[in-house]
């Protein structure tokens, strides 16, 4: 997601609500917000393009590669791999995102127990399985890595990615809104895996051996403030905050904390670093 030029979407921020605390009237469940998947596809997903390309370059992804994207969202990373000649498929839990990916003629099945039974995912094992998006917000990241390992053939690779150190990410202050507005819920720290060895620790017990790592600059750039708020809310990292405090209040606070990153002309830009680990399947 290197630079985001917003295109028209059907998303609208909700009206201000009178009660925003745990006892107040909440808006609909975050995952059901109209246009959220479209906001991801049109605004946010391109922010990690430098990460995707760096991984594909390093692993020389091409016609001999079969790629499975776990939590592939609307499928941009898969499209880039397919453009290099790879055979690609994905698993995604959110129905609207799956439909957007399928609109791009990608094979994407439903993530979760029994989710791939519709024939969308043609293989049982792949030479490369990626987890580009899911780990920072995953409730059980080790289970997700174990699933990736199970779907990787011997000698193949699993790629894990997460935010870099918070001091290297200007979005850290913006992501803190998710923590502060989530109350005493199960909201996860998006930087929990950013500590030294955080991603590598997930490999233990999964039959994976670390085979390399790297850091990639992934600036978050938006056409305007409204696009920035909609894009950030589409990541899922603010779901617990929106459920606890109300989406309108979270959106308002995001607008406030984004002010230091406004550029002349109204665009928004935050410099960020993401880290990835490459692991080899050894059993």
Image (cartoon, helix red, strand yellow):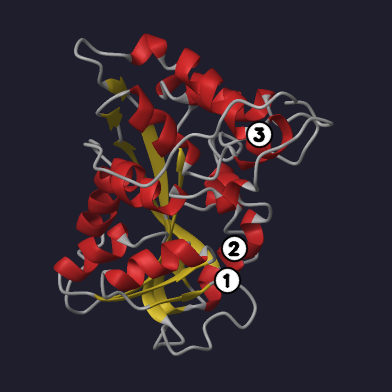
Horizontal and vertical percent for residue 272? 36, 28
Up the image or down, 71 lies above or below 9; here it is below
Disc 3 marks which residue? Answer: 241
Label 1 neighbour load within 10 Å: few <14, some 14-19, many 20+: some
Q: Earlier in the sequence, mark 3 or mark 1?
A: 1
Q: Residues within 10 Å of mark 2 (few under 14, many from 20)?
A: some
Quarter of the image containing the N terminus?
A: top left
Mark number displayed over residue 144: 2
> Within the image, what quadrant is residue 155 found in?
bottom left
Nearest-to-viewer mark from 3 and 2: 3
- Can you give x and y, in whole percent of width and height, for residue 48 in the image? 32, 44
| Labels 1 and 2 touching (C-beta < 8 A) | yes
Residue in the picture at 15% in, 67% down = 83
Q: Considering depth in this image, is 186 or 210 the residue closer to the camera?
A: 186
Q: Which residue is mark 1?
A: 147
Q: Which mark is residue 235?
A: none
Please, what secondary structure does the residue beneath circle 3 have?
A: helix
Residue 164 percent coordinates (x, y):
44, 33
Measured in 3D between alpha carbons, the distance from the residue under mark 3 to the one under mark 1, in whole angstroms, is 28 Å
Image coordinates for residue 227, horizontal then vertical, percent: 34, 32
């Amino acid at each position: 997601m290197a630079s985001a030029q917003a295109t028209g979407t059907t998303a609208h921020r909700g009206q201000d609500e009178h009660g925003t605390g745990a006892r107040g009237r909440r808006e609909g469940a975050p995952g059901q917000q109209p246009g959220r998947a479209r906001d991801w596809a049109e605004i946010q997903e391109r922010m990690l393009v430098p990460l995707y390309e760096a991984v594909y370059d390093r692993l020389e992804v091409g016609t001999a590669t079969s790629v499975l994207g776990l939590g592939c969202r609307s499928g941009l990373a898969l499209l880039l791999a397919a453009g290099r000649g790879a055979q690609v498929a994905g698993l995604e839990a959110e129905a609207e995102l799956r439909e957007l990916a399928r609109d791009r003629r990608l094979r994407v099945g439903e993530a979760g127990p029994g989710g791939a039974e519709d024939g969308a995912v043609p293989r049982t094992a792949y030479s490369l399985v990626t987890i580009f998006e899911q780990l920072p917000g995953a409730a059980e990241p080790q289970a997700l890595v174990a699933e990736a390992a199970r779907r990787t053939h011997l000698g193949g690779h699993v790629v894990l990615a997460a935010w870099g150190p918070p001091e290297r990410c200007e979005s850290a202050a913006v992501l803190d809104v998710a923590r502060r507005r989530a109350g005493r819920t199960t909201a996860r720290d998006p930087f929990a895996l950013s500590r030294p060895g955080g991603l590598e620790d997930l490999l233990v017990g999964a039959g994976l051996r670390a085979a390399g790592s790297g850091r990639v600059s992934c600036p978050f750039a938006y056409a305007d403030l409204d696009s920035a708020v909609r894009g950030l809310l589409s990541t899922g990292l603010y779901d617990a905050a929106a459920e606890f405090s109300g989406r309108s209040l979270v959106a308002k606070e995001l607008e406030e904390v984004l002010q230091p990153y406004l550029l002349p002309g109204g665009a928004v830009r935050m410099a960020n670093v993401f880290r990835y680990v490459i692991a080899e399947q050894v059993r």
